[in-house]
Each structure stands twice: as structure tokens, then as C-alpha cells.
């Protein structure tokens, strides 16, 4: 199993977008991958949230990492989060 590493860009959005490294890893390891731009991959995973984010209460948080699989690791380029 290849290690998963957040790029500096992705790390810079952890607090701003509200995701965790654990959520990103769970998404990559358990959800189907689909092709993304520039030869990268992406996937999506819904997590129970039931909390407030930016002044609104949401039941679900969806984490969508965009990543590249290279020989020795998976590099997460960015992560998008959606709240429902």
C-alpha cells in the first residue's frame, strides 16, 4: 500500500476547507477513482458532519481529493470539500 502525502498546496487548505488528512486517506483508499484534469485522479467520499460550518449547520461533508499516483506514493494536489 503506497503512502499518501499532501502537497504543500493541499496542506495550505486544511483549515480553510475543513478537511483532515484522515478523511483524505479514507476517501482515496475506499472510493472509486475517476480521471481528473492533467492525468490526475479524483474520488469523493461523504462523511457524517452534523455541525456548523461558516455559520450554517450541515449534516454531510463531502471530501474530494485530486491526486497523482507515482511510483512510490500518492501525492494529493488539492482537496475540495462540500457541505450539504
Image (cartoon, helix red, strand yellow):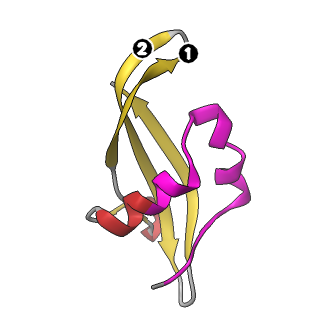
Nearer to the camera, 28 or 50 = 50
Nearer to the camera, 55 or 68 = 55
Spot the residue most to the left: 32
Q: Position of residue 27 (x, y in %)?
A: 38, 58
Q: Name the residue under label 2.
A: 57
Q: Where is residue 82 in the image (x, y as percent from the top left)?
A: 41, 32
Q: Is residue 2 above or below residue 82?
A: below
Kind of element beneath mark 2: strand
Circle 1 residues within 10 Å: few <14, some 14–19, many ≥20: few
Question: Which disc is residue 42 wearing?
Answer: none
**Residue appearing at x 35%, y 57% in the figure:** 43
Q: Mark 1 points at which residue?
A: 54
Kind of element beneath mark 1: loop
**Residue appearing at x 57%, y 55% in the figure:** 21
Q: In this view, does 66 lie to the left or right of 20?
A: left
Q: Quadrant of residue 61?
A: top left
**Residue appearing at x 58%, y 35% in the figure:** 17
Q: Is residue 45 above or below residue 15?
A: below
Spot the residue most to the top: 55
Q: What stretch is highlighted in magenta?
A: 2-25
Q: In this view, does 45 lie to the left or right of 24?
A: left
Select label 2 or label 1 by which is in front: 2
Image quarter (top left, top right, bottom left or bottom right) of the N terminus: bottom left
Circle 2 residues within 10 Å: few <14, some 14–19, many ≥20: few
Q: Where is residue 7 in the image (x, y as percent from the top left)?
A: 67, 62
Q: In this view, does 69 lie above or below 44?
A: below
Amino acid at each position: 500500500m503506497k503512502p499518501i502525502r499532501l502537497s504543500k498546496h493541499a496542506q495550505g487548505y486544511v483549515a480553510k476547507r475543513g478537511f483532515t488528512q484522515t478523511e483524505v486517506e479514507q476517501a482515496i483508499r475506499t472510493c472509486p477513482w475517476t480521471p481528473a484534469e492533467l492525468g490526475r485522479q479524483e474520488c469523493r467520499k461523504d462523511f457524517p458532519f452534523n455541525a456548523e460550518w461558516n455559520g450554517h449547520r450541515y449534516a454531510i461533508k463531502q471530501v474530494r481529493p485530486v491526486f497523482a499516483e507515482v511510483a512510490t506514493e500518492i501525492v494529493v494536489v488539492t482537496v475540495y470539500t462540500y457541505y450539504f
